Amino acid sequence: MTTRSLRAGAAALVLALGAVGLAACGSGDDGGKAAAPAGNDARGPITLALGKDLTRTVPRLVARWNDAHPNERARLVELPEDGDQARQQLVQNMRIKSDAYDVVRLDAVWTAEFAARRWIQELPKDLADARTLVPAALRTGMYRGRLYAEPWLTGTGVLYYREDLLAKAGVKAPPKTWAEMREDCAKVKRLPEGKGVDCYAGQYAKYEGLTVNYAEAVQSAGGQVFDASGKPQVNTPQAKAGLRFLVDGFGNGTIPGKGVTFKEEEGRRAFQEGSLLFHRNWAYVYALASEKDGSEVAGRFDVAPIPGEHGPGSGVLGGNNLAVSAFSKHQASARDFIAYIVSPSVQGEYGRAQSFPLSLAALYDDPGMIKKYPYLPTLREGMESARPRPVVVRYNEVSVAVQEQVTAALTGGKSVDRAAEDLQKALTALAD
């Protein structure tokens, strides 16, 4: 996560696939100056529908807002940990035009859908100073050239690894390729300390995390899920090589069988309990795995960019953005709360309290932050090759199709070739 890579490389990557989504959603040219955001300017109590905060930092920030805004107090509601369940809860709320939520947390790829369906309100472009934000993150909140969701969290997947076990096995550097990772696992398995330690796992349960891990595998083999024109490319030799890496991983024991049930937290706990040598996950894991109370690997792990078929792999650009529900009765208060939570001072405090990578670009050059979270240079390196998921209105259907076919391949229901062929057909139908 960088200033250099985020201001240049990552922005170019977003443009490459972002153009795909915008072509599917409609032209980004508004034909002149965009109209001012509609909505209401009412103030009053607000409800925040955010994700589960394992670091317990957000409630403290909400309490501070409440102390300063006694007539606009915010109530925090935690969305389900499962991303698909969180989305479904929000969709059900929006479909009935409920005013139960005022500020909603959106996965970066939900922006187009929620904006196109007029479920979220356009935001003033000066809600936060765009010059202070990671450009790649800012683009994930845009739809048709307008801002609908303010970037808050961003980042890409990284490889957590047991530095102590690799050193014990004579391995001097983390793996850059899948083959090197398997070789390293074999060396550690021969150690007495390596008994009972599985090789590698990511997120392979049938949910959004599987879509992310599949896309990363495809990209890390030199392929792409969609090309720049919006055409699916999942039946190519490179894309099939990525899927084969996952399927063979379960078949040869590189990935433990129970990994097919792993979401972020199941994998984090397995790594934190010392039962995984390598683990693909997001940056939030760093702070939790470093806690001396409750982590068996504190002080004994490090992070690296994810490996690929022939060299360092390519991660998926993730992130959470904040939006104002179109059905909120107190939209002025909701907008002000978002401005508060993404402000430099609050992001700085939040960044020092937990290891989620935030949208404020300056945090990635802050010596104090790097000292506290040494993973930041690695995350910056990973961001240079990261790619966003397609920004399309029907993204959820795309993700479901990926989950169906990849799960069938991982569980032996289909061959790699058949799953790739069927997925190509399904995505082509969705792209038409």
Image: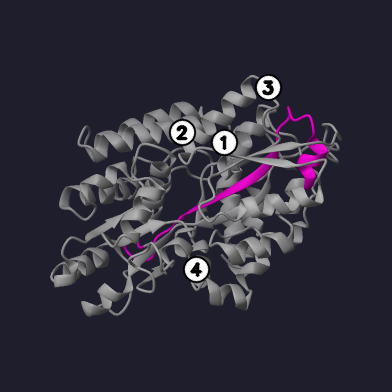
Dot 3 amino acid type: Lys
Answer whether labels 4 and 3 touch (C-beta < 8 Å): no
Circle nearer the N terminus (4, 1)? 4
Residue 132 location (% of width, % of height):
73, 62
Spatial CA span between label 1 and label 2 = 9 Å
User: In 3D space, how far apart are the residues under numbered discs 3 and 2 (Cα atoms)?
Assistant: 25 Å
- Label 1 crowd (10 A; few <14 / some 14-19 / many >=20): many
Image-based side of 128 in relation to 170, left or right: right
Q: Which mark is residue 111?
A: none
Say which of marks 3 and 1 sits in front: 3
Q: Mark 3 points at which residue?
A: 97
With respect to residue 129, does 161 lie above or below?
A: below
Residue 90 falls in which quadrant of the image?
Answer: top right
Amino acid type, label 4: Glu
Mark 3 or 2, closer to the camera: 3
Identify the secondary structure beneath mark 4.
Answer: helix
Q: Is residue 147 at all visible to an observer of this figure?
A: no
Give the structural element (helix, strand or loop) at label 2.
Answer: helix
Label 1 is placed on what type of residue? Val
Looking at the image, is mark 2 or mark 4 earlier in the sequence?
A: 4
Residue at image mark 2: 398
Query: Within the magenta stretch, is there residue 329?
Result: yes
* Disc 4: which residue: 381
Disc with the residue nearer the chain's start (3 vs 1): 3
Labels 1 & 2 near each other (Cβ < 8 A)? yes
The residues bearing labels 2 and 4 have C-alpha atoms spaced at a distance of 28 Å
Residue sitting at 31 percent across and 55 percent down? Answer: 270
Residue assigned mark 1: 392
Q: Which residue is drawn at 45% across and 64% down?
A: 286
Range shown magenta: 307-336
